[in-house]
Image (cartoon, rainbow, N blue to C red):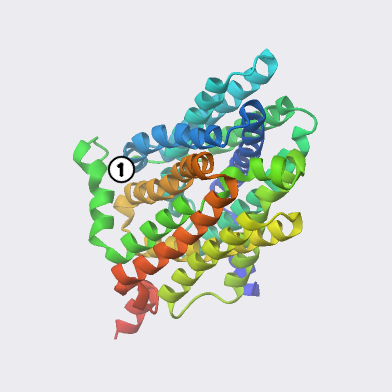
Amino acid sequence: MSAADRGQWREALRHPDFARYAAARFAATLAWQMLSVAAGWQLYAMTRDPLALGLAGLAQFLPFVTLVLPAGQIADVADRRLVLVAAYACEVVSAGVLLWLVWSGQPQVWAVYLAMAFFGAGRAFWMPTGQAITPKLVPPALFPAAVAINSTLFQAAAVGGPGLGGLLYLLGADVVYSVVTALLLLAMGLVLAITPMAVSARAAWQLRDTLDGLRFVFRQRIVLGAISLDLFAVLFGGATALLPIYAADVLHVGPAGLGVLRAAPGLGAVLMAALLAVYPIGRHVGRWMFGGVAVFGLATIAFGASTDFRFSLLALVCLGAGDMVSIYIRHMLVQLETPDAIRGRVSAVNAIFIGSSNELGEFESGLTARLFGLVPAVVLGGVATLGVVGIFMKCFPELRRMDRFPEARRAEASP
């Protein structure tokens, strides 16, 4: 990182509201990662059924996909900090249900699915709202630094959260869920301390406005191609949903090992993000995006076929690095192409694609593992991801041929 970049980071963090939001987001992401590890291990220990892990993803997906478009509209017409507080409160309920399940001493699979449903509802609100609130917390000149800080903290939580969750699980699932609850309550307090945000002058609820984000995305073919490529790639290549089975039955590393496995993609993403900070992608953007997704597919195949813990970790690190390239380019395209007035709604559409690929991908992985077996399901998913790359290169030639980001193209076109 250059001295100028460090200076911008310091300037961004000197804005108290942004510093509070960044800390809250880090705490909430850490809690989310810890909860995912503990809930996945607990559910598989209760059922020994890969489909149960898939149904947990479906339980998150259904409320998420139902609520996320209205949530994007709310983020554009309401005080965004209060929307975030409500979202984190839903996740407190999720952790509370899981904590009650442990304390009751009577395992109930339906209670885990209920907790995941509350978690999905919370994500439906914090994903679009979190993306829409950042530009209002810092001056425009510091927005790139704010995005970089948020991304760094997210990836740090993605690396540290699973490992911490796995280690704490050795002390008991109730310990994990208690820490998760405390972190989410801390996040709520930090967001409430942010200065109240003025509501837009046209803050009237219009049902038809809820679909503005969808209409915008489908008019921008490059944006549509970028986010739908990510959707189908992760949908078919979602090996992370089956990590509890690999940790228990293939690699035999227990809940602590599961935490390390869950952290490995985040580590790969952090390393790639650091590389992109030093050597940002400036040319051949489309090729880089397709290449990153192809690496994701190849790493999925390698992980699925591995029975060695160290090689599995390496494959997952490569998987996270490839995915980070796709995330980086998609995020840049969405931010640079979207007007602020509909940023919440467009972010909601982006969240639908991301959520569909993650939660629905978990269901697809669990179902195919039940039908075809664990290893064939993961390997075939990686092969399908490579097939998606080939299909999208043909269907979206403008994305494949894209050389520079829109901002750079506009700068070149200016007199």
**Residue 10 seen in this snapshot:** no
For residue 212, above or below residue 248: below
Q: Is residue 158 left or right of residue 63?
A: right
Q: Position of residue 361 (x, y in %)?
A: 47, 46
For residue 411, above or below residue 37: below
For residue 361, above or below residue 330: above
The amino acid type, in three-letter code, at marker 1 is Ser
Q: Quadrant of the C terminus?
A: bottom left
Residue farthest toward the right in the current orientation of the protein: 171
**Residue 365 seen in this snapshot:** yes
Q: Is residue 56 left or right of residue 76?
A: right
Q: Which residue is mark 1?
A: 200
Observer-nearest of 400 and 411? 400
Bin the neighbour count of mark 1 within 10 Å (Cα to Cα): few under 14, some 14-19, many 20 and up.
few
Q: Residue at x 48, y 51 (%)?
A: 137
Q: Is residue 373 left or right of residue 397?
A: right
Element assignment for label 1: loop
For residue 75, above or below residue 231: above
Q: How many marks?
A: 1
Q: Position of residue 265 (x, y in %)?
A: 62, 56
Residue farthest toward the bottom in the current orientation of the protein: 415
Q: Residue at x 52, y 40 (%)?
A: 366
Q: Residue at x 33, y 51 (%)?
A: 346
Q: Quadrant of residue 148?
A: bottom right
Q: Position of residue 136 (x, y in %)?
A: 43, 51
Q: Quadrant of residue 30?
A: top right
Q: Residue at x 65, y 72 (%)?
A: 1
Observer-nearest of 60 and 245? 245
Q: Position of residue 174 (x, y in %)?
A: 71, 25
